[in-house]
Image (cartoon, rainbow, N blue to C red):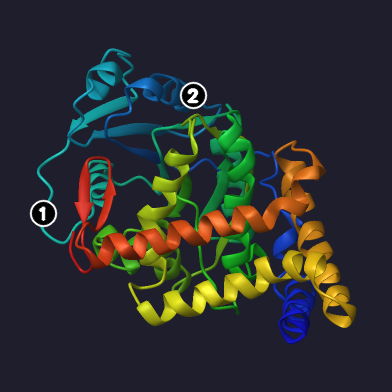
């Protein structure tokens, strides 16, 4: 146990000092206006989004942006009247498309996005956003200003997620924290670093850059589509990833089961469906998250000291994210329990895959190497 505690402490020394300052919970997209106002097409893929689509579209149509912009909603086989709700808005800047049947080897969302981009004409930039995102009036202008100031081909944000139910308060801040751990934003934003990621709720991309990587068709089967697209774009130009202060998700996750299903959708995909990577990940999670509190409470001597220090370090690393989500710092010592939940969901995702149940989302099931 002492050796494991020493290993845990060494891991946390590295994470805090050498892992891209992932814990800092930044940067934020600044409020500002661009010097120019190029044309923008906003593409919204939507499947069964009736509870949230009206609010989302209203926010997009209310953007305070000096340039021409048009919103294209692609109704991806909704059965709840999503498309009818959108058409009822009657705004000439909004086009509602009925999505065509999904071809083989395409994920449902990316096929919808592809159709929206095809309908966008010659817009200079494309804003790809989810149907559950509500945007402040200044959001589009701020995204354009960020792209303009940095000469960026892609600007993306981790939008503020809903954090109202007990399950959301316990698990959602950790989702953001673990995403930052996987993809430190400072590394993503450094052109010389290979790390690339985006958050699918808000992705602004230059049309020319997208065309250089073969368009959405280049990542058509990806289930972690935002990261796949970011990797492709970063190969041809600089990208930026930060936190949103001008956009938020209104999709609720009222129970732990809802968050469990969200995690199992992509957790094993992230590991490339590899049993070896799964075993390595589980062992790594145990040493990084579970060993510190266990040894701190049940160990002795050097082991207890190292375990206690590692536990304190992981708790401290979580504080900026808790502050962002206005959660009490008392949640921080319990982060190992949340990590155990995420680890169990990853194992469940692997079991689903190897028993033939695949990845289920929006009433669709995907298998490895299939769409």
* Residue 344 drawn at (x, y percent): 48, 59
Residue 166: image tag: none
Residue 140: name its quadrant. top right
* Residue 79 drawn at (x, y percent): 18, 26
* Residue 290 drawn at (x, y percent): 66, 66
Residue 78: name its quadrant. top left
Q: Nearer the viewer, residue 209 or 103?
A: 103
Element type where label 2 sits in the image: helix
Residue 10: name its quadrant. bottom right
Residue 278, above or below 61: below
* Nearest to N terminus: mark 2 or mark 1: 2
Q: Nearer the viewer, residue 354 or 127?
A: 354
Residue 110, above or below 21: above
Q: Which residue is mark 1?
A: 103
* Count of labels in the image: 2
Q: Is residue 229 visible?
A: no
Residue 42 lies left or right of residue 286; in this view the side is: left
Q: Which residue is mark 2?
A: 59
* Residue 148 drawn at (x, y percent): 59, 53
Q: Residue at x 57, y 66 (%)?
A: 182
Density class for disc 1 (Cα within 10 Å; few <14, some 14-19, many ≥20) is few
Q: Residue at x 63, y 41 (%)?
A: 170
Q: Residue at x 49, y 30 (%)?
A: 254
Q: Nearer the viewer, residue 125 or 74?
A: 74
């Amino acid at each position: 146990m002492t050796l494991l505690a020493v290993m845990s402490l060494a891991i946390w020394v590295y994470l805090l000092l050498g892992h891209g300052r992932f814990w800092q919970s930044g940067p934020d997209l600044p409020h500002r206006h661009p010097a120019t106002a190029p044309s923008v097409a906003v593409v919204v893929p939507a499947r069964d989004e009736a509870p949230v689509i009206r609010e989302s579209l209203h926010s997009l149509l209310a953007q305070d942006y000096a340039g021409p912009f048009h919103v294209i909603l692609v109704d991806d086989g909704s059965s709840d009247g999503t498309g009818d709700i959108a058409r009822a808005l009657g705004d000439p800047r909004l086009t509602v498309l009925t999505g065509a049947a999904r071809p083989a080897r395409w994920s449902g969302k990316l096929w919808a996005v592809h159709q929206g981009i095809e309908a966008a004409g010659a817009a200079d930039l494309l804003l790809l956003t989810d149907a559950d995102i509500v945007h402040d009036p200044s959001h589009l202008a701020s995204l354009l200003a960020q792209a303009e100031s940095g000469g960026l081909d892609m600007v993306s944000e981790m939008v503020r997620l809903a954090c109202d139910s007990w399950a959301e308060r316990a698990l959602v801040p950790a989702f953001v924290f673990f995403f930052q751990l996987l993809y430190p934003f400072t590394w993503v934003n450094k052109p010389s670093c290979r790390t690339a990621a985006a958050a699918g709720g808000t992705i602004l991309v230059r049309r020319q850059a997208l065309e250089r990587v073969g368009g959405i068709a280049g990542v058509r089967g990806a289930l972690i589509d935002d990261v796949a697209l970011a990797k492709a774009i970063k190969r041809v130009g600089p990208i930026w990833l930060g936190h949103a202060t001008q956009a938020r998700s209104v999709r609720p996750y009222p129970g732990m089961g809802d968050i469990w299903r969200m995690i199992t959708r992509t957790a094993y995909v992230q590991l490339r469906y590899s049993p070896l990577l799964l075993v390595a990940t589980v062992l790594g999670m145990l040493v990084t998250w579970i060993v510190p509190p266990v040894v701190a409470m049940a160990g002795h001597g050097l082991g207890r000291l190292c375990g206690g220090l590692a536990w304190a370090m992981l708790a401290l690393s979580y504080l900026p994210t808790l502050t962002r989500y206005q959660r009490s710092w008392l949640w921080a010592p319990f982060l190992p329990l949340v990590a155990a939940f995420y680890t169990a969901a990853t194992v469940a995702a692997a079991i689903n895959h190897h028993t033939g149940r695949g990845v289920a989302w929006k009433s669709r099931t995907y298998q490895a190497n299939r769409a």
